[in-house]
Image: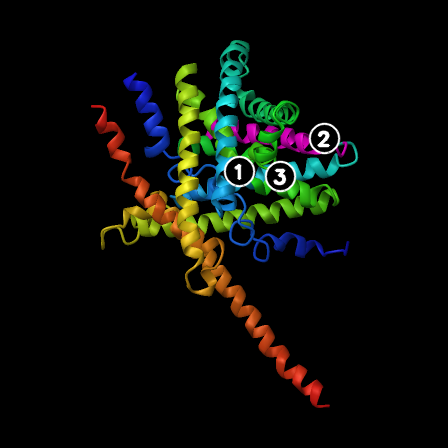
Amino acid sequence: MEKKSKLSIFTNGFIKENPILVLILGTCPTLAVSTQAVNGIGMGLAVVFVLTCSNILISALKKIIPDNVRIPCYIVVIATFVTIVQLVIKGFLPSLDKALGLYIPLIVVNCIILGRAEAFANKNSVVDAALDGLGMGLGYTVALTLMAALRELLGAGTVFGVAITANLITPFSLMILAPGGFFTFGCLVALVNYIQMRGKKKKEAKELPAAEEGGAN
Amino acid sequence: MKEMLMIIMAAVLANNYVLVRFLGICPFLGVSKKMDSAMPMSIAVIFVMVLATAVTWPIQHLLLDPLGIGYMQTVVFILVIAALVQFIEIFLKKSMPSLHKALGVYLPLITTNCAVLGVCVMNIDEGYTLIQALLNSFGSGVGFMLAMFLFAGVRSKIEENDYPAPFKGVASTLVAASIVSLAFMGWSGMVDNIFK
């Protein structure tokens, strides 16, 4: 396996392999929680914590955990950290606990976390795993918050609870309900696809004249 | 009786797990491509949901609550579900090979299906009795099946059409899901009013 720089491990999750918009992992909480920007940040940070901690622990224990029972072991590690997050949120942020509700325990079955444990943490050093967890988690948070802010703006006319268009036009409240979630998510994925396609075309356009020149010589 | 019907109707239609509560989206997007794989997957989900509730409800009320370790819920439930799925697979392999062949690939996928853990946790949160919890699980499973079937039909129509390239793949599926979900919103007021 080729050695990657620490920075590229960290930034990987932001753009190139953004867990929500490119890998399409962890869709369930993404759709359910992204009704308000504040919820997006809360959920995102909970995932950052669980992902980083479980990545570190799994990477540290990778030699001890037998290969045959690794998945149950990962699940126990992840569930432990999720329980910690659950208790902290319940204790200190009761309003966030009410908003996220069922979706906090469901972080356990979020495919991102198990996916990173299996694909990255059990093959790499502790430091790399921590960076990967942080990067992936923050990429998740950014995408989730962006989507939540968009839905909040369209559906309620506010962003982070601050009125922007709420007094000017009647908000399109469908956007914060279930269909709006699917729709916004679909459009964002299409936008990312579009940007990637354009990037590829530009690259090809650049390479093509160069290749022709080479052929002429 | 009225109350029981209401729980089932609400779980199948008004609070549809996939389209309204956003649980189990991964298999919904992944497996709903074809009718013939949607069927065994949905049956496996109903099966595991009801069994998982039948096991986790007594665990919560007879073991975790009396011992005062309710906070272990997440850890215990996910392990129980994983073990249960594993056990069902072994059991089916030995006693019903034909059923195992049909459901085989889908069973392990269900362990990481948030709908199963979701329904178990929700049954506890809502304070259902064991019978109500089982009905709710069954209804939720049927709701999953209904959404899968409807959506498999919608999807096969989409595939034949021409639409902008960036929407190819998941994006078009999500937009289509949004429209199907819009249809399901019509049920939300209805269930409460039917039984009044």
Q: Find residue B186 and report its horizontal and vertical position in percent.
A: 27, 40
Q: Chain of mark 2?
A: A
Mark 3: give few (<14), some (14-19) or many (20+) Cα within 10 Å: many
What residue lies at 49% left-to-right and 32% top-to-bottom?
B43
Is residue A1 visible to the viewer in this orientation of the structure? yes
* Amino acid type assigned to the residue bearing label 3 in the image: Leu
Q: Chain of mark 3?
A: A
On the same chain: label 1 and label 3?
Answer: yes
Main secondary structure along the magenta-highlighted residues: helix
Task: Determine which of the numbered discs, if any, sits on residue A69 in the image.
Answer: 2
Q: Chain of mark 1?
A: A
* Amino acid type assigned to the residue bearing label 1 in the image: Ala
What residue lies at 55% left-to-right and 69% top-to-bottom?
A199
Q: Residue furthest bottom?
A: A217
Task: Give the number of callouts.
Answer: 3
| Marks 3 and 2, how far apart at CA | 14 Å
Looking at the image, residue B4 sits to the left or right of residue B65; the answer is left
- The residue labelled by disc 3 is A114
Marked residue nearer the N-terminal end (1 or 2): 1
Task: Determine which of the numbered discs, if any, sits on residue A46 in the image.
Answer: 1
Q: Find residue A48 and report its horizontal and vertical position in percent.
A: 57, 42
